């Protein structure tokens, strides 16, 4: 059995965007069970897979096998009956996943799909945030400009604001799902999330008028007698991404 599997961040995005968590989980399990990339998946082999997965019966397993075939991650030789589990390299070529950003997942990762998806997506955006800071010394998010001095612009040592709306805009993943993946990545110990607030020097009636006029977003809460505007959550990943091999030029 392989010790770790390298997974492209773009594959994680594809899975999250298209709700392919169960087929993805099966794909990873197949990669661990069959490092050579081939199997006939006879009944006894399917039963071994079923023992590892939260499926009720073989019908669920077979349905996800068919889904993997539909998206081109699993192919079956009509003559020999063997299934080919496509390599990450082949999938990158097939889907034009040119980015070299990736993560490593061990066998336990098979059973933590939402956390590793959240880790991949938010860590990628975290790195991208600091890349922009290094270039521009400031980043504008949701109508607010974040300024940083050069000496503090060091990734993986400081929190950075990563918005769920940014996940939606860049990757087409709903804000609800982006929030869920962030929570899962945090609960799984992959990232830390810190809430951020700004004091508002307004009365309750004034805040209501500002919200109605859309002058401020409706994320306002009262803490110790003061009204505060909830800002973008601050993120700090606990692990780095890896760099995948370059794709050959065509």
Image (tube, rainbow, N blue to C red):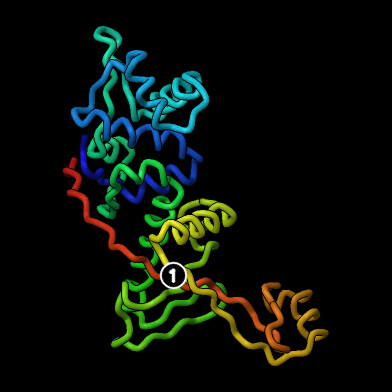
Image quarter in which the N terminus is found:
top left
Q: Identify the residue at image location x=47%, y=38%.
A: 20
Above or below, comparing residue 161 to residue 52 in the picture: below
When asked about the image quadrant of residue 228, the answer is bottom right
Q: In screen coordinates, is 194 left or right of 229?
A: left
Above or below, comparing residue 143 to residue 89 in the picture: below
Q: Identify the residue at image location x=79%, y=79%.
A: 208
| Residue located farthest toward the top when viewing the structure as drawn | 79
Image quarter in which the C terminus is found:
top left
| Residue located farthest toward the front when viewing the structure as drawn | 51
Where residue 4 sits: x, y (%)? 24, 45
Above or below, comparing residue 211 to residue 20 in the picture: below
Where residue 231 sits: x, y (%)? 57, 76
Where residue 26 sits: x, y (%)? 39, 32
| Residue located farthest toward the right when viewing the structure as drawn | 205
Quick one: SS at disc 1?
strand
Question: Local crowd at mark 1 within 10 Å, few (<14), some, or many (≥20)?
Answer: many
Q: Identify the residue at image location x=32%, y=85%.
A: 152
Q: Which residue occupies the foreground of this view, 100 or 237? A: 237
Query: Which residue is labeled 1 in the image?
Result: 235
When asked about the image quadrant of residue 138, the answer is bottom left
Q: In screen coordinates, is 119 left or right of 197?
A: left
Where residue 187 sits: x, y (%)? 47, 59
Q: In screen coordinates, is 68 left or right of 55?
A: left
When asked about the image quadrant of residue 111, the answer is top left
């Amino acid at each position: 059995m392989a010790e770790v599997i390298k997974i492209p961040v773009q594959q994680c995005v594809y899975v999250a965007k298209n709700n392919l968590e169960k087929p993805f989980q099966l794909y990873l399990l197949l990669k661990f069970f069959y490092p050579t990339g081939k199997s006939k998946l006879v009944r006894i082999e399917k039963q071994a897979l079923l023992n590892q997965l939260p499926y009720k019966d073989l019908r669920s397993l077979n349905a996800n096998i068919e889904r993997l075939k539909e998206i081109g991650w699993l192919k079956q030789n009509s003559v020999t009956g063997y299934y080919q589990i496509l390599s990450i390299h082949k999938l990158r070529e097939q889907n034009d996943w040119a980015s070299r950003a990736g993560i490593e997942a061990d066998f336990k990762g098979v059973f933590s799909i939402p956390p590793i998806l959240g880790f991949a997506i938010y860590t990628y955006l975290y790195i991208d945030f600091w890349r922009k800071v290094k270039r521009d010394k400031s980043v504008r998010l949701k109508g607010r400009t974040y300024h940083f001095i050069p000496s503090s612009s060091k990734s993986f040592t400081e929190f950075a604001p990563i918005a769920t709306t940014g996940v939606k805009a860049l990757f087409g993943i709903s804000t609800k799902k982006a929030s869920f993946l962030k929570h899962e990545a945090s609960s799984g110990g992959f990232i830390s999330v810190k809430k951020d607030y700004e004091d508002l020097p307004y009365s309750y009636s004034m805040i209501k008028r500002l919200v109605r006029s859309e002058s401020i977003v409706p994320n306002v809460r009262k803490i110790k007698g003061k009204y505060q505007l909830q800002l973008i959550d601050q993120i700090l990943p606990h692990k780095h991404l890896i760099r995948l091999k370059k794709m050959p030029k065509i």
